[in-house]
Image: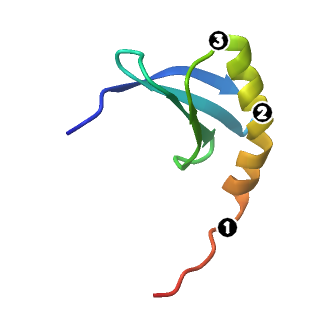
Amino acid sequence: MEKDTSVVARYHYDERFYVEVICQVPHIGARDYWLCNRNSENKLFMFSKEYEGLKREERLIARNICNAIERYERPAASCTL
């Protein structure tokens, strides 16, 4: 089964990073927020949240983006099997 999703917004942070907001169609349920790097196809899932308006969405992203960038840039811990 495949979900039908669409990018509903992009918030540009700086020359390297932006946040992509993805929502299921029709626009019900939570939105997913992904940190994206312009120089890479890798994305980092930030969080999901119900949409509560443009200003609240902007504040939510602003509160979380620095932590997300740190997680994105931190190398993954090596794992042994």
Decide: marks 2, 3 in contact (CB < 8 A)?
Answer: no
Inspect the image, locate mark 3, and give the three-letter code of the amino acid beneath it: Gly
Q: Is residue 13 visible?
A: no
| 56 shown above or below 73 | above
| Distance (Cα) linking label 3 and label 1 | 34 Å
Mark 3: secondary structure: loop
Name the quarter where the N terminus is drawn. Answer: top left
| Distance (Cα) linking label 2 and label 3 | 23 Å
| 13 shown above or below 71 | above
The residue tagged 2 is 14
Q: In the rendered image, which quarter is residue 62 located in?
A: top right
Q: Position of residue 55 (x, y in %)?
A: 73, 13
The residue lying at 55 percent from left, 24 percent from top is 50
Q: Earlier in the sequence, mark 3 or mark 1?
A: 3
Decide: marks 3, 1 in contact (CB < 8 A)?
Answer: no
Q: Position of residue 53 (x, y in %)?
A: 64, 12
Name the quarter where the C terminus is drawn. Answer: bottom left
Residue nearer the viewer, 20 or 58: 58
Q: In the rendered image, which quarter is residue 11 located in?
A: top right
Q: Earlier in the sequence, mark 2 or mark 1?
A: 2
Inspect the image, locate mark 1, and give the three-letter code of the amino acid beneath it: Pro
The residue lying at 77 percent from left, 24 percent from top is 59
Mark 1: secondary structure: loop
Q: Position of residue 18 (x, y in %)?
A: 66, 33
Q: Position of residue 23 (x, y in %)?
A: 45, 25
Mark 2: secondary structure: loop
The residue lying at 72 percent from left, 40 percent from top is 16
Mark linked to residue 53? 3
The residue tagged 1 is 75
